[in-house]
Amino acid sequence: MRYVDYIGNLTRIAVEIVNGDDPSELRREMFRQHRIAEPDTERLSAFLPGLRDAVEAASRSGPIGPVNALLAQHPPLIHVDDHDGEGSPHLHFAANGEDAVSWLGRSCSAALAHVVCGDPAVTIGRCSAIGCERFYVDDSRNRTRRFCSNACASRTTVAAYRARRKETG
């Protein structure tokens, strides 16, 4: 695994949790590889406001306060891991087998710190569609994505088209 993929995957998981999405295949696989059980709803709910603030800050490249708060609350435990010889060595930010919220806190806070510091390979955006509050990880070639999904992009495009048609009569 390339280090940038690890940061990107953790960032995707943070965005998925903040958006309230069901666990993705990526999240299930990361939890399996790191021997993490799905978090209980109550602990995840308590963790969510700080994570949401940090994702919001990373999506705007600052302020750094929310990311630092998450780092202080869940300090990363940096170590090198190779998944018991199954992959190439890379940095981890939390111990395998840790409880889910601690693992997510340590891992996501470190990944979001990379993002807010301008890691060029991972960018978080907020959907530009009216009424949509979702975040996304922008992995487009030139980092110009504006919408969380094709549905939001299409809805915005259709609304703009209808507005132009209405103006011209």
Image (cartoon, rainbow, N blue to C red):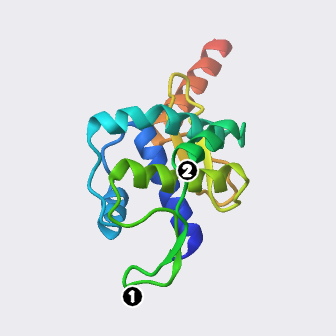
Which residue lies at the image location 39% right of the left edge and 32% below the top edge?
46
Q: Is residue 87 above or below residue 17?
A: below
Q: Nearer the viewer, residue 10 or 39?
A: 39
| Pointer 2 local density, CA inside 10 Å: few below 14, some 14–19, many at least 20 | many
Q: Amino acid at mark 2?
A: Ser
Q: Quadrant of residue 98?
A: bottom left
Residue 35: image location, x then y, percent: 30, 66
Task: Choose the circle earlier in sequence order: 2 or 1.
Answer: 1
Q: Is residue 119 above or below residue 168?
A: below
Which residue lies at the image location 61% right of the left edge and 18% below the top edge?
163
For label 1, the residue is 85
Residue 13: image location, x then y, percent: 44, 52
Which residue lies at the image location 73% right of the left edge and 54% below the top edge?
118
Q: Quadrant of residue 85?
A: bottom left
| Pointer 1 local density, CA inside 10 Å: few below 14, some 14–19, many at least 20 | few
Q: Nearer the viewer, residue 82 or 169?
A: 82
Q: Secondary structure at mark 1?
A: loop
Q: Nearer the viewer, residue 126 or 140?
A: 126
Indicate which disc residue 109 carries: 2
Q: How many marks do you count on the picture?
A: 2
